Amino acid sequence: MKEVTIYTDGACSGNPGAGGWAAILIYNGREKEISGGAPSTTNNRMELTAVISALELLKEPCRVTLYSDSQYITDAVNKRWLAGWAARGWKRKGGEVKNPELWQRLVPLLHRHEVEFIWVKGHDENAYNNRCDALAVAESRKFK
């Protein structure tokens, strides 16, 4: 199984507001940057879109180490909230799960790939996270 490292980030100017997402995929010493955005969205939607877009780009099942500064995503997977939400029909204790259609796109990707989610502090010393942030912010600015 190929081993891929992915860094992701999302950005939003206003919440909701103009947003952008970005990911860097690293395989065998090569890097690929992807990014996009939306005119009216939320930061969490952009964070999720970055993860989904990166995983969808992989052409075969891979072992992935995915770095994100989004505790929303890393906790949802690592603390098994996502599995509970799915089992309860996309509901959580406090009501409906936000962004269910994005979580539903993510679930099959997590079954296809072996993904380890690692939280990294945003706007810190991680060059890849900082690059993703710059790409995501640039995408969000396209809608102003």
Image: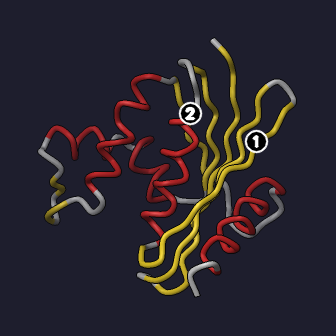
Circle 2 packing at 10 Å, graded few (<14), some (14-19), many (20+), is some
- 107 sits to left or right of 84: right
Amino acid, disc 1: Lys
**Element on which disc 2 rests:** strand
Q: CA distance from mark 1 to mark 2?
A: 19 Å
- Residue located 50% across and 24% down the image: 113
Percent position of residue 62, x then y: 59, 21
- Residue located 55% across and 84% down the image: 13
Amino acid, disc 2: Glu
85 vs 58: above or below: below
Residue nearest the observer in this picture, 54 or 128: 54
The image quadrant where one finds the N terminus is top right
Residue nearest the observer in this picture, 57 or 116: 57
The image quadrant where one finds the C terminus is bottom right
- 97 sits to left or right of 9: left
52 vs 70: above or below: above
Tag 2 residue: 116
Residue nearest the observer in this picture, 13 or 88: 13
Percent position of residue 133, x then y: 70, 66
Mark with earlier residue (1, 2): 1
Q: Count all numbered tags in the image, as a single digit.
A: 2
- Residue located 26% across and 54% down the image: 100
- 100 sits to left or right of 133: left
114 vs 91: above or below: above
Percent position of residue 120, x then y: 66, 54
Percent position of residue 18, x then y: 51, 80
**Element on which disc 1 rests:** strand
Residue 32's label in the rendered image is 1
